[in-house]
Image: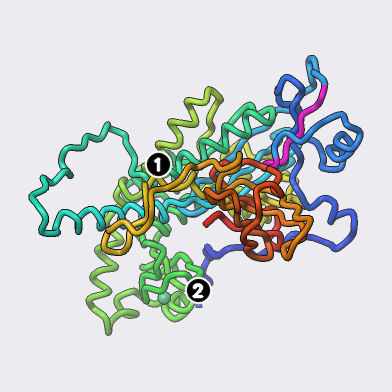
Amino acid sequence: MHAKPSTSVDEVSITLATGGSQEQKGMMMCKVFVLDTHKRPLNPVHPGHARLLLTKGKAAVYRRYPFSIILKRPVEEPDLHTLRVKVDPGSTTTGMALVNDVSGEVVWAAELTHRGEQIKQRLDRRRAARRSRRQRKTRYRQPRFQNRRKRPGTLPPSLESRVCNVVTWVRRLIRLSPVAAISQELVRFDTQALENPEIEGVEYQQGERAGYEVREYLLLKWNHRCAYCDASDVPLELDHVHPSSKGGSNRVSNLAVACAACNQRKGSQEVGEFLKDDPARLARILAHLKAPLRDAAAVNTTRWALNARLKALGLPVECGSGGLTKYNRVRRGLPKTHWLDAACVGSSTPDRLQVIGVMPLQIMATGHGSRQMCNVDRFGFPCSGPKGAKRVQGFQTGDLVRAVVTRGAKAGTYVGKVAVRARGIFNITTAHGRVTDIHHRFCMLIAPSDGYAYQARREAAIPPSA
Ligand SMILES: [Zn+2]
């Protein structure tokens, strides 16, 4: 039987060498950001160095997340090693990495989880409540859905929130570290390398790099499904529809994606022979082979909007493709995670990436509370009093606080997100559950609410505020 070329597009499963030694445990984190006393960013330092500066009183904690310290003296003409912010935007999770292009060191990494889906659900709920209110037989109400105007380029709220999340974090990193450039994954595959792939006859063996672009192209064209059995969420391989042993070309218009089982069963058969019992599918596959992928499917509005806003920050923005990211990552033997994908974005990626011991910060977008004036029941009727003040005794819902209760049944120390109540008696959500009825006198602010929840390690979770 004709040996098929190695066209597996499943993920490499290489685990990072992580021993249990004390030394490596100490390294399991990102570097700490440092500002001088005039809030000018300096080179990030090792957490041990930061701890020394803090205990000697030479610096103070500036921000809890991402952990940053501020020196108590100015630094004139510091020797800065410039860094690059790298972003791999995703619809649910965006990977971010701060990379030193010269040394290849990943200085800091994070995975940012968006709340786009939650925003959509809330808007749907509001729309349903308003609609049912208008439907009720009270009096005539003019429909108001047409008296809105959208500026060109306006994104839907759920997408806008994703873009804003990323821009917020890039700006934060620019303020906290010597960032000189930005890299962003803009498109799934490089359209320049694959101009008219069906017509020009791009072949997937035109060099390894082009192979990755072709694979991304084909996966998108076949909608990440096996062409022969519609299986998704399985490793997919490239299949020569007209087998190469019988003179089939490596052109994109002769390639489909198939699961390993179908690819194995088809072997070197002709597609007509293989699918002789399923003429409908055969016709569909033959038609789909000829049809080029619509450009619209490859262009992602959110990513282009993000690109425009990143360019407005005034730093050079490098754009990469998904195919290049994967090529970079697989060639360096790195497993697939959001932050490692981010570190591999763009052609500026250093040959050796130092990633051992980097613990990405888990960031969850939580929003800044609700704009609803009172709660409504499922029929859209108000079911609570009007909302109280957002700030109570200097605290607001979502702040990270430490409560040291010295007496009574609740005596103890609690650290977590606070939910304020107008009476000044709060609830605190800690890693071990919710503690109710803590007086504000016992609470001390650790970090003000900034619309995000954080989780440095999985076991020490700070759940997003309810
Ligand atoms: Zn299959």
Magenta-drawn segment: 64-72
Q: Position of residue 408 (x, y in %)?
A: 74, 62
What residue lies at 41% left-to-right and 63% top-to-bottom?
Answer: 224
Is 374 situated left or right of 391 in this image? left
Q: Comparing marks 1 and 2, which lies closer to the viewer?
A: 1
Relative to residue 464, is residue 156 depicted above or below? above
Real-space Cα separation, disc 1 to disc 2, in angstroms: 51 Å
Q: Identity of the amino acid at label 1?
A: Glu
For mark 2, give the secondary structure.
loop
Q: Which residue is mark 1?
A: 160
Quarter location, residue 84: top right
Relative to residue 107, is residue 180 depicted above or below? above
Q: Residue 32 colored magenta?
A: no
Outermost residue toward the left in this view: 140
For mark 1, give the secondary structure.
helix
Q: Position of residue 102 (x, y in %)?
A: 73, 33
What color scheme is it? rainbow
Q: Position of residue 196 (x, y in %)?
A: 34, 45
Q: Residues within 10 Å of mark 2 (few under 14, many from 20)?
A: few
For ligand 1, the image quadrant comes to: bottom left
Q: Identity of the amino acid at label 2?
A: His
Q: Residue 67 colored magenta?
A: yes
Q: Which residue is mark 2?
A: 2
Is 223 situated left or right of 323 in this image? left
Look at the image and tell me whether residue 341 can be seen. no
Q: Position of residue 427 (x, y in %)?
A: 60, 57
Of callouts 1 and 2, the N-terminal one: 2
How many numbered tags mark residues here?
2
Cβ of mark 2 under 8 Å from ligand 1: the answer is no
Residue 83: image tag: none
